[in-house]
Amino acid sequence: MDFHLTINGWPVAGARELEVVNPASGQVFERCACADAAQLDAAVEAAEAAFPAWSIATHADRMRRLSSLANAITAEAGRLAELLTLEQGKPLGDAIGEIMASAAMIRFFAAFELRDEVVCDDHSARIVVHRAPLGVVAIITPWNSPVLMLANKLAPALRAGNTVVCKPAASTPLTALAIGSICRDIFPPGVVNVITDANDLGDRLVAHRAISKISFTGSTAIGRKVMAGAAGGITPITLELGGNDAAIVLDDADVAATAPQILAAAMRNAGQVCMATKRAYVPDNLYDEMCDTLAQLAGEIVVGNGLEKDVAMGPIQNRDQFQKVLGYLQIAHRDGNVIAGGAPIEGPGNFIAPTIVRDIIAKSPLVTEEQFGPILPVVRYSNIDDVIGLVNASPYGLGGTIWCGDTARGEAVARQISSGIIWVNTYMDLRLNVAIGGVKSSGMGVEMGLDGLLAYMRRTVIHIKPARA
């Protein structure tokens, strides 16, 4: 595959080279182009030059090109999925699912046909809400789901008529570069630009004078830096940041049916999902049974190289995150009773055994912080109001789940949780036509749905007073 930068429709060798490590082996398996400041500037300038023509392209033209991109990604699904597993670590089946979901995301936004909204048309006035693209959009994506997060931003940005400069995470650059190479044959030069860095060009990109919108997914700490960089130009931003999603089990839940779903929500992608369940609250009457069931199921998860058959969970994606998760394992042993896992898996790679922790204090950092790894603390409770208070005390507010028999009661609890989305008796069930976003330190703005598309457009009210007869 082509691992050059994409700048102004051309493959460009990097000013330097970036080594890409397979987290399952801990070894460098590929090298790719890496931009310097001058190449970043060139990418932004190319996008700026391409914007006037692309901003007035027809709906049919944009739809055709976005549909072509989705078709090309689907055609390359096998190779892209293998590449995704190699650089990110997730099992191949999950990687294929991410690639196909990304293509579906692009097709969804391609089909939107936006028209002016007439809000008044009578003898007093004609008032029209007109929406237009913003300009050059900086797209900054994370390492946990690099293809899906790219599609989730690229598709609405392009459909709205913007041009883009995409910067993937330094540890998962290859799939983004590969998709950039596909875009060269589909979009006019300069419409899609993809550059990589060694975690040193983000500040320059978000503060660039030609950037008209920033869409960032990543940690809350980096999100704050993005906000600071955008402040100089008062640049609009969408931030999808960290989370500490809680699973609240009510006392009428069915443990046998609920435990596998809670575990799946916690261990998906080795816990490296912003909306993963990162803490569970279980009532006294179900606590022992729930803990025992979770521990048994965690011990059955097959952990290993995502390219190997029957592997259900891969490694932690990078060494820095691996060290952070090891620190949380120490806290788990200090503050609770580890009943499954609790240690790294010997051998090469960043593997950690799926871990369940019971009898843990509610104020432990393992409960109150975002560990972003395969560790689930299970907190016992007696009073649901206390749980609601503990969940809402978190600085995060991304997602969460309620597990119950009486769904009306579950909905009543969900309405008291300060979070962007709450699922009742399901998890991470994301619909393309439903916009979602975090609250508090989990971000600002929304993605997906019509509102997610409109976030890439400016709104102008045109108020026309009728001419005198």
Image: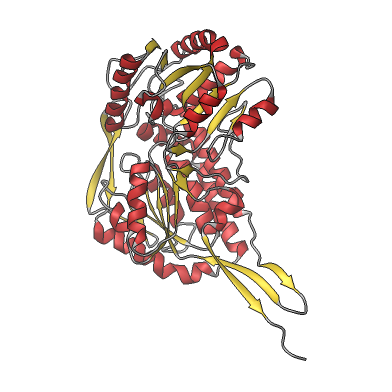
- Residue at screen point 69% across, 22% down: 406
Task: State the image coordinates of residue 33 (x, y, percent, origin top left).
Answer: 28, 49
Give the quarter of the figure containing the N terminus.
top left
Task: State the image coordinates of residue 356 (x, y, percent, origin top left).
Answer: 42, 15
Identity of the residue furthest to the bottom in this view: 469
Q: What colour-coding does the image apply? A: secondary structure
State whether residue 4 is above or below residue 363: below
- Residue at screen point 35% across, 48% down: 224
- Residue at screen point 35% across, 35% down: 87
- Residue at screen point 22% across, 54% down: 15
Task: State the image coordinates of residue 89 (x, y, percent, origin top left).
Answer: 38, 29
State whether residue 298 is above or below residue 397: above
Nearer-the-camera pick, 280 or 60? 280
Count the numbered circles shown. 0
State whether residue 256 is above or below residue 228: above
Give the quarter of the figure containing the C terminus.
bottom right
Quadrant assignment, res 110: bottom right
Residue 276 seen from this side: no
Residue 208 seen from this side: yes
